[in-house]
Amino acid sequence: QVHVVESGGGLVQAGGSLRLSCAASGSISSSDALGWYRQAPGKQREVVAIFTHSGSITYAESVEARFSISRDIPKNTVALQMNSLEAEDTAVYFCYWRRWSTGREYWGQGTQVTVSS
């Protein structure tokens, strides 16, 4: 069964850094949508950073200057480097993968990121 698994969440002080990683159990391609969403308590899930089907990267405006997404296609992984973290970044972060070839979507179980102010 195909799935994605996140790791790397935790508690950090404001101004600190965290790196999230996500491993896909199947082979990813450069045409797949692959990236990160987050959901804070009482809020809707929102995109944080994602590789689109065209290969371009989209960032949420609130993180563009602080976060960086990267992927390693041969290793089937995607990572999110988060710097200068703010209390507003506190949320559950989800890895997302949509295969171009099948259109199927896969979500990770989520990893908690808590930023203390």
Image: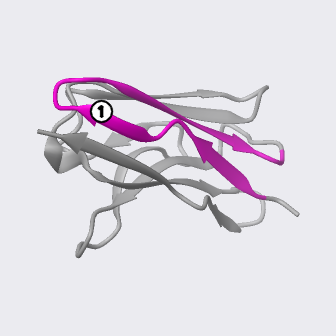
Query: Is residue 36 left or right of 47 when viewed as pictured?
Result: right
81 to 29, vertically: above or below: above
Percent x, y of residue 2: 82, 59
Residue occupied by mark 1 = 12
Is 8 one of the magenta-colored residues? Answer: yes
What residue do we see at 26% from left, 50% from top?
A: 90
Is 42 one of the magenta-colored residues? Answer: no
Percent x, y of residue 49: 39, 43
Q: Quadrant of residue 45?
A: bottom left
Q: Quadrant of residue 58?
A: top left
Image quarter (top left, top right, bottom left or bottom right) of the C terminus: top left
Q: Nearer the viewer, residue 117 or 90?
A: 117
Which SS type dominates the magenta stretch? Answer: strand
What amino acid type should be assigned to the residue bearing mark 1? Val
Q: How many marks?
A: 1
The magenta-colored residue range is 3-26
Percent x, y of residue 107: 61, 62
